[in-house]
Image (spheres, rainbow, N blue to C red):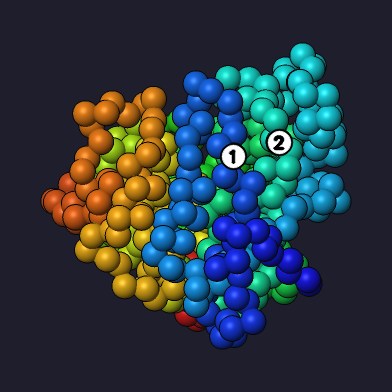
Amino acid sequence: MSIRPDMSPTNKSRCRQAETKRHDPLFVSSEVYRETGYGTNHPLAIPRIGTVLDLCDALKWFENAPYVESLVASKAELTRFHSPDYVAALQEADRDGKVSSQSRQRYKIGTMENPFFPGLFKRAATSVGGSILAAKLAADGRTVYHPSGGTHHSVANLARGFCYFNDVVFAILTFLDLGVERVLYLDLDAHHGDGVQVAFESEPRVLTVSVHEENRWPYTGAVDDRGGGFARNIPVPAGFNDSELAFVMDEAVFPMAARFGPEAVVVCCGADGLSGDPLSSMSLSNVALWDMVARIVELVAPAVVVGGGGYNPWTVARCWTGLWGRLAGFEIPNSLPSIARDVLSKLECDLIDDDDVDDAWVNTLADAFNDGPVRAEIEEVVRKALQVESHPVNYILANSNKRA
C-alpha cells in the first residue's frame, strides 16, 4: 500500500516514515479534522484533533515517531458494513448540500443529534479509511494510534450518537481479513460502545468489552447484556475514580482478555470519562486512562488505539496528546512549553464556563491521579460481569489456553 502523507508546511516535520523502526508506534490522522465540523450548537462543534496535532508539533513528538496521513475509504469499502442505500444517502446530501426529508427520517442524518455540515462525507469516510489503514499498519506487531477514530455508535443503516460511519467496526474487520482469529475490542468511552457490540455480538472471533457510565445515553450495555454471547459490559456509577478503574481492569477486563487469548486488540479511549467533561459524570484522570491503554497494548499486539467521545476541548486535547506520548515513549513534561500553552489558551467551549477552566488545563498535560475508595457497587458489577452462563463464549473464556 502506498502511503502519501500531506507535505504541507504544517506536516513536513511529522512525515519521516523512512526512519521508523519496524515496530515503532505510528500516529494516523488527517488535516481534514482541523475543520471542527458539526455546525454550531453541537457538543462536537469544538476543536479536538487539530489541537492534538498542534500540541504534538509543539512538543516535537512527530519528529522520531512519524505521523501517517489517513486514507479515505472508498464506497466499496464503506459498503462492506454499511448498507449501500445509507452510503448513497450521505453522498447525495454531500453533493446537494442538504438532506432530504426522506433521508432525515429514514437514516437519522441532518438531525440535531447527527447534523449535516459541509464536508461531512469526506470526514466520516476518512475516519473509516484511517482505521482500516491503522489495522493494516499494525499487522506486523506494532501499535497504531488513530485518535480521529472511535465513532462507535453508528450501525449499518443509521447515524447514531454523532457517528455516521462506524470506523471501529472496520478496524476489527481488517484484522479478521488479515487472518487474526481472535480480536478483543475494549471500549473505555463514557458511553456504551453499542454499535460495535451489535456488529459483532454473534461473531465468536470478536469479544467486545465496554466499561461505561450507567444510566447514560444510549442507555444500553447493562451488566447482564451479553449480546449474542460475545459481549461483556461493565456499567459503572457516577464519580467513577482511578482506583475503581484499576479494580475493574485488574479484576475483570484483564482476566477476560487473558482467557479469551486475543491475537489483536482495538481500544477505544474516549476522553469523556475524564473529570470536567460536560456529558459525563465520571471522574477519571487522563493518567489513569494512559496507564490502562498502555498495559493492554503491551499485552496484545498488534493494537489499534482510537479516540471516541470527549466534549471538553482542553481535557480531550491533553488526554489524547499525552496518550500518544505514552505510547511512543516520550517523557511527559511537568509543565508545557509556551507554544503549547498558547494552543490551549485559545480554546473555547460553550459548554464550559470561563470560570470553570482549570489552570492545569492550559499549563500541564498530565492530571493528578484521582484515587479513592472502591465502592461496593463497583465490586458487585465486576462480580456480575464475570458470572458464567450457559453459552459457547463462556467455554472459550473459561478454557482458552492462549495468553493475552
Left or right: residue 360 compared with residue 97? left
Q: Is residue 10 above or below residue 96?
A: below
Name the residue type under label 1: Glu
Name the image quarter holding residue 346.
top left
Name the image quarter holding residue 204.
bottom right
Residue at mark 1: 35
Residue at mark 2: 119
User: Tag 2's secondary structure?
Assistant: loop
Q: Is residue 162 above or below residue 98?
A: below
Tell me the residue at 50%/73% (across/down). Answer: 63
Marks 2 and 1 close (CB-CB < 8 Å): yes
Tell me the residue at 43%/68% (across/down). Answer: 60
**Is residue 220 or residue 128 the one in the foreground?**
128
Where does the image place residue 28, in percent across and percent down from the top left? 59, 62
Residue at the front extreme? 9
Query: Mark 2 to mark 1: distance in Å?
Result: 9 Å
Where does the image place residue 32, in percent across and percent down from the top left? 64, 46
